[in-house]
Structure formats: structure tokens, C-alpha cells
């Protein structure tokens, strides 16, 4: 059966890193007899430049019909002044919303080979393995009312709304509990129940779900500000962190940096299963478009490559192939090859395309 992959390379370093992913996909087709069928389309600033919108309806439809979407990155200073609805980031938000990708999985894994690249002491981060589950289609990112209005005295008022229903909280909490069962069986749920009603609701719903369906999983609640602090104090206390859209945005950047390089971190965004058991999904590196190094063939493609490995695991039910790809990345690092962002003394510096080729050599 053909497996439909839509690649949206996007802006900045997106096209360069996705190019390496394409090479890997084609390697699988050739050597593992997979039948991945790649379509490439525009999203983000590059789509705005061509079509006047960051995501056309036809690309959205392609995404809805694909088995997996692989996204590079969107955005850049060139489009900073556009109104909100035209900004490159809207492409991302619309894909998340319309594909109903409510569960965002953001692993923060510190490869032993890179533990000295972290700003934290190696013993604090070495072998770190955290999974952040960020709610992705609700909360303040999408809540209504929103906008900026003029007040009678001529001053202006900006409004965004943080809102969650119990169903939205429960479905993402289920993802977190189920994932924890396959890991170290521990969930830390983070909110601000001390100041926000919606935060208290979050805590109560997670608590109730735990009591009725997931008693076997260890559950802790933590205020989000404390979680931010605990992440740099003693990150290995965490297994799965469950949190809302905005806190998840911030905590996942923080957790990402613990590992030494954002350039290494993949992510998966998943929908509910439909009646045929199929999940819609989008995979993307956590890093952004890095416009300062775009087009120089020096960006780190490993986060995108590892995102494809998540696709093998979560969309294509190919866990052994996913592990094989993860291992290939690890081996390349063990051999001392580094892109500039993770370069250290006595290592061998390689370009984006060389890094992709090295991973393919290891696969072989
Ligand atoms: C992320 C990014 C996005 C977000 C931006 C680019 C809209 O920061 O995926 O973490 O805020 O969700
Ligand atoms: Mg972010």
C-alpha cells in the first residue's frame, strides 16, 4: 500500500534539512521495499510570496488526505510586519487546528555523546529522556474573544482568551497516560491552578481520569512555574510532562535546551484515531527557520531526520525501522561527526548534506 507523505519544507533552513529527510525516505523505498509516495508543497512565507496566503486550501486538502505531513519550518524577518492572518506561522496553526492535532509529543532526549554541549552540568542531563505532551489545538492560542480594540479614551486593549473544556483536557491526558505506560509510567501534569480557573479544571479532570482509568500510572501535579524551575534543577525527576498549549510551548523550549541543541529535537502532532483506526499526523523539528544560517548548507538536519523516525513509529507502525534510524543517528554522533551548532573540540565538522549522507551510510 502506498503511504502518502506530504512535505512542506517551508522557509529558512526548512528546505535544506527536508532535503536530507527526502534522501532518507528514498533510501527506505529502495532498500527496505517501502512505498512512500512523496508530494512537495509550499507553506509559510514562501506560500505567501507566491499565493498571498501562508497556506492555500488545496495544500490543506492535500494535508488532510496524507498519511503524514512532514514540515520543515515557517517564518522569518521578511514576513514579520504582515497582519496576523497572513503571517507564516498561521500555516502551522491552521494545519494543527484543521487536522485536529491536539496532542503534541516533544521528546527531550540528551544523547550521551552530546551531554557536554548542554549549558547544564553533564551529570544533570546525560541520558535525560523526557516526553512533553503539549495540548495543541486549544487554550490561549485559539480562544475567543481575541483581538485588539480601541477604547473610548483612545487607548487600546488587547485580548486573548485561555479556555479549555473537560473533553479537551481528558483526551490529551489520555495520550499522556497511555504513553507513560510504555515509558517509566510517570506523569507530571502542569498548570496554574493557584491563579486560573481553567487551570484548576485541568487539575481536577486529570485527577478524575487518573482515579478511574489510570491508577497504575504515577501522577503528580505541579504548578507550571515550579516545573520550569525543576526542569533546570533536577530534570531526571520527569518522565512524561502533560501541559496546555502555552505552558507547553515554553516548557518544551526549556527542556529542549537542556539537551544541548534544539537542532536535535523532533516532534509529532497527532489527532484522535478515526473509525478505521487511522491517526492524522504532522512531524516537525522543534527548531525554527534560523534565517541567519539559511542557504549555507550548515544547518543540523538531525531533528528533521528524527522527526521522520517518529513518523515511522506513530504513523506507519514501523518501530524497528524507527529504531534503526535512531541508532544510525546515534552512531554518526559516536563517530564524532557534528554540524556547527553542536560542534565541540576534536570533533569533525560536517555540512547539512554531509550529515544526511553519513546517516545513510550508517543505515547501509
Ligand atoms: C512551536 C512554535 C510555534 C508555537 C510558533 C511558530 C507558532 O513556537 O511550535 O513551539 O508557538 O506553537
Ligand atoms: Mg515554541
Image (cartoon, rainbow, N blue to C red):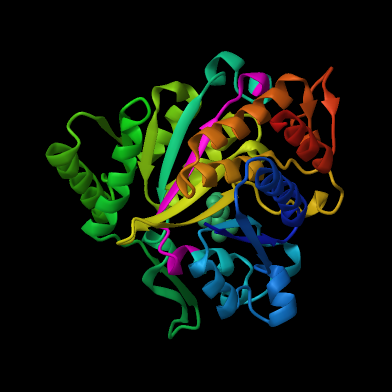
Can residue 284 be found in the magenta stretch?
no
Q: Quadrant of residue 12?
A: bottom right
Q: Which residues are magenta?
A: 96-114
Percent x, y for residue 279? 40, 56
Placement of 81 over or under 338, stated as above or below: below
Using the rendered image of the protein, determine whether residue 192 is visible from the camera's viewpoint: no
36 vs 55, nearest the viewer: 36
Residue furthest to the top: 123
Percent x, y for residue 71? 62, 57
- Who's the residue at 60% across and 17% down the image? 121
Placement of 76 over or under 310, stated as above or below: below
Placement of 308 over or under 359, stated as above or below: below
Query: From the viewer's perspective, is 277 left or right of 340?
Result: left
- Who's the residue at 44% across and 39% down the image? 132
Residue furthest to the bottom: 152
Residue furthest to the left: 212
Quadrant position of the C terminus in the picture = top right
Q: Quadrant of residue 81?
A: bottom right
Using the rendered image of the protein, determine whether residue 235 is visible from the camera's viewpoint: yes
Percent x, y for residue 294? 81, 53
Percent x, y for residue 261? 66, 34
- Who's the residue at 47% across and 50% down the image? 315
- Who's the residue at 69% across and 62% down the image? 10
Can residue 107 be found in the magenta stretch?
yes
Amino acid at each position: 500500500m502506498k503511504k502518502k507523505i506530504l512535505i512542506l519544507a517551508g522557509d529558512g533552513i526548512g528546505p535544506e534539512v527536508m532535503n536530507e529527510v527526502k534522501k532518507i525516505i528514498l533510501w527506505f523505498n529502495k532498500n527496505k521495499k517501502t512505498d512512500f509516495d512523496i508530494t512537495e508543497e509550499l507553506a509559510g512565507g514562501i506560500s505567501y510570496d507566491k499565493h498571498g496566503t501562508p497556506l492555500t486550501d488545496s495544500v490543506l486538502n492535500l494535508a488532510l488526505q496524507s498519511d503524514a505531513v512532514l514540515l520543515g519550518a515557517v517564518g522569518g524577518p521578511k514576513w514579520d510586519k504582515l497582519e496576523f492572518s497572513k503571517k507564516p506561522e498561521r500555516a502551522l496553526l491552521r494545519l494543527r487546528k484543521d487536522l485536529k492535532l491536539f496532542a503534541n509529543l516533544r521528546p527531550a532526549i540528551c544523547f550521551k555523546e552530546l551531554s557536554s554541549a548542554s549549558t547544564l552540568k553533564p551529570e544533570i542531563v546525560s541520558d535525560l529522556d523526557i516526553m512533553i505532551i503539549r495540548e495543541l489545538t486549544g487554550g490561549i492560542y485559539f480562544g475567543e474573544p481575541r483581538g485588539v480594540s480601541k477604547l473610548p479614551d483612545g487607548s487600546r486593549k488587547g485580548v486573548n482568551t485561555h479556555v479549555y473544556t473537560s473533553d479537551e483536557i481528558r483526551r490529551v491526558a489520555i495520550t499522556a497516560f497511555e504513553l507513560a505506560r510504555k515509558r517509566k509510567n510517570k506523569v507530571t501534569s502542569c498548570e496554574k491552578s493557584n491563579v486560573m480557573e481553567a487551570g484548576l479544571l485541568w487539575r481536577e479532570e486529570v485527577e478524575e481520569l487518573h482515579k478511574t482509568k489510570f491508577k497504575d500510572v504515577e501522577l503528580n501535579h505541579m504548578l507550571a512555574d515550579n516545573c520550569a524551575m525543576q526542569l533546570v534543577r533536577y530534570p531526571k525527576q520527569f518522565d512524561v510532562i502533560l501541559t496546555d498549549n502555552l505552558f507547553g510551548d515554553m516548557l518544551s523550549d526549556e527542556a529542549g535546551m537542556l539537551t544541548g541543541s534544539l537542532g536535535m529535537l523532533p516532534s509529532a502532532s497527532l489527532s484522535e484515531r478515526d473509525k478505521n483506526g487511522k491517526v492524522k499526523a504532522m512531524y516537525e523539528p522543534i527548531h525554527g527557520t534560523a534565517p541567519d544560517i539559511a542557504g549555507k548548507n550548515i544547518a543540523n538536519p538531525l531533528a528533521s531526520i528524527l522527526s521522520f523516525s517518529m513518523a515511522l513509529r506513530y504513523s506507519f507502525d514501523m518501530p524497528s525501522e524507527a529504531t534503526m534510524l535512531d541508532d544510525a543517528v546515534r552512531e554518526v554522533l559516536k563517530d564524532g561527526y557534528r554540524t556547527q551548532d553542536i560542534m565541540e573540540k576534536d570533533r569533525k565538522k560536517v555540512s547539512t548534506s554531509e550529515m544526511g549522507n553519513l546517516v545513510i551510510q550508517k543505515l547501509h
